[in-house]
Amino acid sequence: MPKTVELKKQRRGALLRTVVPLWLALSAAPAWAQNAASAQETPAPAMLVADRVFVSPDRKLVAEGNVEAFQGDIRLQARRISYDRQTGILQMEGPIRIDQSGSITVLANAAELDSELRNGILRGARMVFDQQVQLAALQMTRVEGRYSQLYKTAVTSCHVCEDGSPPLWQIRAERITHDQAERQLYLEGAQLMVKDVPVFYFPALRLPDPTLERADGFLVPSLSSSSTLGVGVKIPYFKTIGPHRDLTITPYLSEKTRTLDLRYRQAFRNGEIEITGAFSRDDIQPDDGRGYLSLRGAFDIPRDFKLSFDLNTVSDDGYYADYDISDTDRIRSEISLIRARRDQLIEGKISNYKTLRDAENQDFIPSTIVTGTFEQRLFPKAVGGELRLRLNASQFRRESSLDATLTDANGRDMSRVSADATWLRSWILPWGIESVWTAGIGIDSFALSDDAAFDNDATRVTPKAALTLRRPMTRQTASGAVQVLEPIVQLGWTHVNGDDTPNEASNISEFDQGNLMALSRFPESDVREDGETFVYGVNFAHFDTSGWFATGTIAQIHRDQAQSGFTSSSGLDGRNSNVLVAGQLGLRNDLTLTARTLFDEEWSVTKAEFRGDLERDRVSLAGSYLWLQADASENRTEETSELWFDGTYDLNQTWRAGANMRYDITDGRATRAGLGLTYSNECVTLDLSLSRRYTSTTSVEPSTDFGFTLSLNGFSVKSGNTTSRRSCSKT
């Protein structure tokens, strides 16, 4: 009689936990592990669960019925497993399933493996990566616990229907070898099939294992058509250089250009850098090589400082626009060092500018600007309140040596050092009135050269003081909504003493809620406001229990005398400023509307801007409208009226449409417009785009661009967190 062990356990049968050769085999060599080093670690305990375990008459250990074996992150399931101690052979009857940490799953009908699961044959096998990419084969052979060889194999990441209909795409190969150590797939005699129609044939093909995050090889190519560059294709190649560096090489070949794009990235222990650039030979400037270079990086350095840099250069004014790299019309390069703490700020910055504008002369703009800022907050116990100390230095030069005049800066060079000390203290007065007293002084020192309009050395001292009163009031309505009303009044005084100085950095100013209570509304200390001011206004807000809210501000500034230096469209010139009306409306987190408008004394609009953002299940839309009156001081000879929007709409689970436009209402024409259409499911992503740039200068011509990109999901960069799975038709 055979020796039989049966253990009854609740509904499903018996549970047996003991050490048998099968578990020792699983412990000795976790064959499906991806990291070779992990196999050398101390193995985790093994456990076997089965309905019945017994020793057969021929001395084989047999487990039957819902067999499951666990060891570490490996889980093996089968209908029946038998182990022959003499031959060391494991025989499994399916359905068989072997899972490794959720990333690799092997399915088979039957298997015969050695005791260490390193060598053997699996029949009717399938290998699935990340629950997406699957390899189905008639037979799979395991070799040395590292290689899996699959014969007569089909590879796809598409949902495979049980009715036998072909997937959207698949790769069929005579043999596929999976190298677990290198995480690579080697295909022999491979064909790319689209709906069972052969499209490409590859005698040999290598693909990264989908569980590998970084691997050498070609990335998704893209096809484009441009009215300036013709029809072309970009074929990026990704090269890893160790675990912390990589290089992407992208040849761009078209009818009118030969371009090589490069991107190098490197990660350090305390930061990272990225170098991008391109070199082109094209028909636009056939006699010249063209290109650009960009170096970006950021590093954490000792004592909480952060070093960052963004260095850029381009061969000519039209290269960025011709190759759709950027819409910028001035190139800025910058190196900055900053440390921000709760009560202290230290910042140093070096900036360089290169103009791409036809109307600007590079010699007449500040090409290199050096700035430094130190700010400190103190809380003196003797007088109470808060003391803010600020030291700011700025220096720039122009290439031109032509002397500046009262109307033209020409070659003026300037150095400035500004020091500010401001004391603030608040009190709560009777009836809930909050008062804030501000007092301080600002000192500015200037050194000028190449200037015929101002003295070479100038000094300015500006004492300042202000008293701000506000009375916040809240109430709750019968429906539970909270409403806030806050009248605000400020009496301010500044007095500028000293020499006249040029306005270099404060030519254009904005009037909004951010600088409403400031004692100087110029953006920099080149110019300071002078005189007495009276600010009055009101803030209000409504927060509804249903989720919508509304906030707003209405305010105006009155001065004892007109303030020079502000442009007419800034809303700050004259004795009385424009009336500022600003607000925001939010509707249940779906729609947010923001608006700001300035009204003059005749209640005519001098500036208006409006922005809206809509986010819903199928719609994403963002847009803005801007209107500016004509202002020669801001180099605007006619009014500006411009509309911009960008949005997408999900047509269904797989198709998404998008559009964007920037429209100049004054000129009655678009400056940019684009359309996009995307198809995406679990196994493929198709992007189609059409864009038109209408603007033209002496260095840039209008252009129309068409783009096409096809990605086979599973072997390409992930495009998002959600995908749609195709449904199988039912008859």
Image (tube, grey):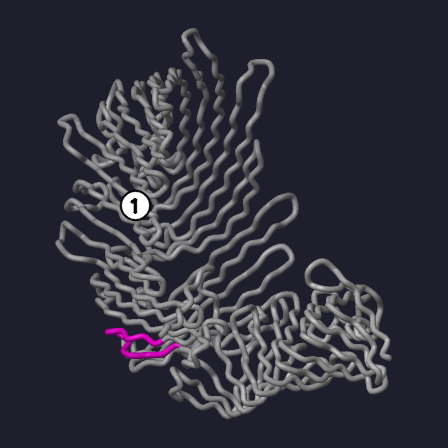
Q: Nearer the viewer, residue 23 or 275?
A: 23
Residue at x 30% of width, y 49% of height: 622
**Residue identified by numbered label 1:** 409
Percent of width and height locating residue 580: 26, 29
In the displayed structure image, the side of residue 187 where residue 728 appears, left or right: left
Instruction: Locate the C terminus and report the quarter of the image it occupies.
Output: bottom left
Instruction: Locate the N terminus and report the quarter of the image it occupies.
Output: bottom right
Whether residue 231 appears in magenta in the rendering, the answer is yes
Q: Helix, strand, or loop for circle 1?
A: loop
Q: Where 662 falls versus 705 (above or below)?
A: above
- Image quadrant in which you'd find residue 127: bottom right
Q: Residue furthest front?
A: 1
In the displayed structure image, the side of residue 117 where residue 601 appears, left or right: left
Q: Nearer the viewer, residue 550 or 539?
A: 550
Label 1 is placed on what type of residue? Answer: Ala
Residue at x 40% of width, y 49% of height: 397
Asked if residue 107 can be seen in this view, the reply is yes
Residue at x 38% of width, y 44% of height: 449
In the displayed structure image, the side of residue 111 where residue 541 appears, left or right: left
Whether residue 605 appears in magenta in the rendering, the answer is no
Q: Where 681 falls versus 198 (above or below)?
A: above
Percent of width and height locating residue 122: 65, 84
Q: Callout 1: 10 Å neighbours few (<14), some, many (20+)?
A: many
Q: Nearer the viewer, residue 268 or 388?
A: 268
Residue at x 38% of width, y 65% of height: 314
Percent of width and height locating residue 730: 37, 72
Span colored in magenta: 223-234
